[in-house]
Amino acid sequence: MTPEAQEGNIFTSSLDFLVNWGRKNSLWPFPYGTACCAIEFMSTETARYDLSRIGSEYVRFTPRQSDVLLVAGTITYKQAPILKRIYEQMAEPRWVIAMGACACSGGFYDCYCTVPGIDHIIPVDVYIGGCPPRPESFFDAMFDLQKKVEDESYMKQRAERLKEQIEDIKRKSKECREDLVLRKNEACEMVSNTVRSKVNDVLDVFPFKKGR
Amino acid sequence: MNFFETLFPVLETKFNVEKDASAHWDHSVIAKASVLRDLITFLKNDESSKMEMLLDIVGIDYLGFQDYESPRFAVEYVLKSISRPGNRVRVKVFVSEQDLEVPTISNLYPIANWQEREVYDQYGIIFTGHPDLRRILNHVEFEGHPLRKDYPAHRRQWLSTNDFLLPALEKRLESKGYKVVERSKEVLPNEDEYLTGSIQE
Ligand code: SF4
């Protein structure tokens, strides 16, 4: 909105720090597990590896309440529209992890039915190789994602969003104004037409005035 | 004595079947499509065989097979006996490319319903008399039959919207005595969106 929000000053950068700190330490995953990789994710959740150390133990099975879409498994063409819809239902900010060779590239399913990488459908933030990846590499990916979250500027995004909104509002109000002017002219014309016809009617009734 | 040695002469006289020379490890007979239903009924019910279980229905495409001419396709039924453990038999029916029809056995074995749908989906073989011959593995917008040898294995086909399953669900509910009183607006498909959704190639 104002240049103030875009510039990094003490207030905005500390707010960024605070927001990112909160976000990165409580990334709630949505496990979109379609195949064997999902089993490996389960073991990441267990006491032995303990995903709650980085605040991500709270697995949500609804896209409305989760931050990270974790695609673990093979995505077929029949599955693709569903995955896309789930992604579209997630609220911003959202991130995507492609777990395993299948989600990254289709893996060894090089055939008529498997999507060759989910990045054909949705944007991906972190890829994890392996078939299946070990829990350690999953943690590695989470740390990468945390770094990425840390770098994002909440205030900058907000400023951009606001700028977009204001431009939207401006555009819309301009349209409205033009519309209004158009309609005002139309209305004026209509009124003047009726007045003129009324006057003519009156003149018809009192023809004596015509002669003058 | 091996059960097949007593069973085979009966089948030979009754249904005019042949032994499959290519079967080395199990018992397999080749039958004509016209006697298939009678043959399977016999194998299922007769005291000498009692094949109560249909393990699988398999399609085969012989295109490009070494030293082999026609017919191009075959359908195989793998049967197993439960009351006489260990007894198994395969029934093979050849199907030519011009006439892709085989009678259904889905009223003999309920599982054959889905297995026949799979063979139809992957090979395009038509099971006459099947109650609901639709694709089962591939999506509704798929063209062609992917396990045929002349289907390019890498030809990928995108699906634009997921299948709308509510009509099938409602039909099932109604068959069980429920009635649809009202549908919420959200579950009804949008005419513009249906099958032209957000995924593009
Ligand atoms: S990458 Fe390997 S382990 Fe993971 S879903 Fe694919 S086949 Fe299964």
Image (cartoon, coloured by chain):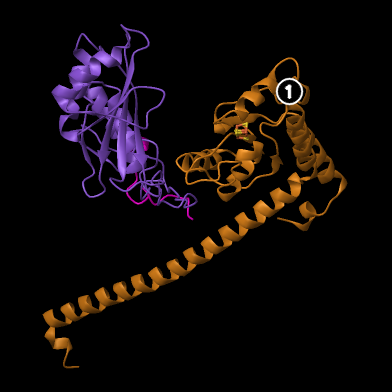
Chain colours: A orange, B purple
Q: Please, which residue is most extreme toward the bottom here?
A: A212
> Within the magenta stretch, is there residue A166?
no
Characterize the magenta stretch by its predominant secondary structure.
loop
The secondary structure type at the circle numbered 1 is helix
Q: Give the residue at mark 1.
A: A51
Q: Amino acid at mark 1?
A: Leu
Q: Is residue B51 visible?
A: no
| Most foreground residue, B128 or B88 | B88
Magenta range is: B186-201
Q: Please, which residue is most extreme toward the top here?
A: B83
- Quarter of the image holding residue A65? top right
Q: Quadrant of the N terminus of chain B?
A: top left
| Most foreground residue, A160 or A71 | A71
**Relative image position of residue A33 (x, y in whole percent):** 57, 30
**Relative image position of residue B85 (x, y in whole percent):** 36, 8
Q: Residue at x 32, y 48 (%)?
A: B69
Q: Ligand 1 is found in which quarter of the picture?
A: top right
**Relative image position of residue B66 (x, y in whole percent):** 41, 46
In this picture, is A43 found above or below A161? above
**Relative image position of residue B164 (x, y in whole percent):** 35, 38
Drawn side of residue B66 relative to residue B133, left or right: right
Total number of numbered discs in the rendering: 1
> Within the magenta stretch, is there residue B188?
yes
Q: Residue at x 74, y 33 (%)?
A: A142
Drawn side of residue B108 relative to residue B80, left or right: left
Q: Residue at x 64, y 43 (%)?
A: A104
In this picture, is A151 found above or below A204? above
Instruction: Indicate yes or no: mark 1 CB to ligand 1 under 8 Å.
Output: no
Q: Is residue B74 visible?
A: yes
